[in-house]
Image: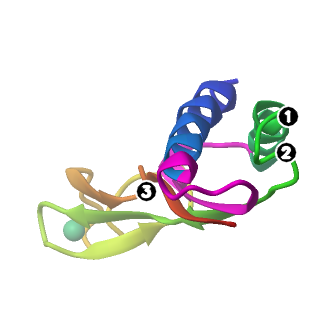
C-alpha cells in the first residue's frame, strides 16, 4: 500500500504551501497522478483522510486527476496512450519505448482561505 507514503509526502507539501500562503483553512486539494503510479483511488482517499485529521485541511475535499500513460516508440517515433499493461507500439509492434507521461505526482492546486 504505497498510497500512504505518497499521500504523506504530498500532504506535507500541501501544509507547507498553505503556511506560505497564510491559509487558515484548506477547502480543496487537487492532485495530479500518473496512471503509471498505479495508485488505487480508494486507498489514496483513505490515506488522505487519515493524513488530514487534526490539521487545517481537516474538512478539505480531495480531487484526483489521473494522467494517462503516454509512450513514444523509439523505432518509428509514433506516440500513443497506453490503455493496457501491454507495452508495445500499435504501429510497428516495437517494444523499445520512451515514457512521455504517466509518472506524474503533483499538487495541481490548493484552495482555501
Ligand atoms: Zn513503432
Q: Nearer the viewer, mark 3 or mark 1?
A: 1
Q: Please give the residue where the numbered disc 1 appears in the rendered image.
A: 53
Point out residue 34 in the picture as x, y percentages from the top left corner: 50, 55
Circle 2 SS class: loop
User: Badge 2: how crowded within 10 Å, few (<14), some, or many (20+)?
Assistant: some
Point out residue 97 in the picture as x, y percentages from the top left corner: 23, 54
Q: Earlier in the sequence, mark 2 or mark 1?
A: 1
| Magenta run includes residue 28 | yes
Tell me the distance, in whole angstroms, between the alpha carbons under discs 2 and 1. 5 Å
| Residue displayed at 35% across by 57% down | 88
Q: Residue 16 or 33: which is nearer the viewer?
A: 16
Q: Earlier in the sequence, mark 3 or mark 1?
A: 1
Q: Please give the residue where the numbered disc 3 appears in the rendered image.
A: 102
Quadrant of the rendered image holding ligand 1: bottom left
Q: Label for residue 58?
A: 2
Point out residue 100 in the picture as x, y percentages from the top left corner: 28, 62
| Residue displayed at 76% across by 45% down | 56
Tell me if label 2 and label 1 are in contact, CB under 8 Å. Answer: yes
Which portion, as a residue range, is magenta? 18-40
| Magenta run includes residue 25 | yes
User: Badge 3: how crowded within 10 Å, few (<14), some, or many (20+)?
Assistant: many
Tell me if label 3 and label 1 are in contact, CB under 8 Å. Answer: no
Amino acid at each position: 500500500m504505497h498510497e500512504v507514503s505518497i499521500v504523506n509526502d504530498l500532504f506535507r507539501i500541501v501544509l507547507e504551501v498553505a503556511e506560505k500562503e497564510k491559509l487558515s483553512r484548506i477547502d480543496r486539494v487537487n492532485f495530479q497522478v500518473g496512471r503509471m503510479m498505479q495508485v488505487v483511488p480508494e486507498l489514496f482517499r483513505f490515506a488522505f483522510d487519515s493524513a488530514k485529521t487534526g490539521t487545517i485541511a481537516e474538512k478539505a475535499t480531495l480531487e484526483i486527476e489521473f494522467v494517462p500513460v503516454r509512450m513514444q516508440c523509439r523505432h518509428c517515433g509514433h506516440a500513443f496512450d497506453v490503455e493496457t499493461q501491454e507495452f508495445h507500439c500499435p504501429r510497428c509492434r516495437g517494444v523499445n519505448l520512451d515514457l512521455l507521461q504517466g509518472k506524474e505526482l503533483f499538487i495541481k492546486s490548493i484552495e482555501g482561505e
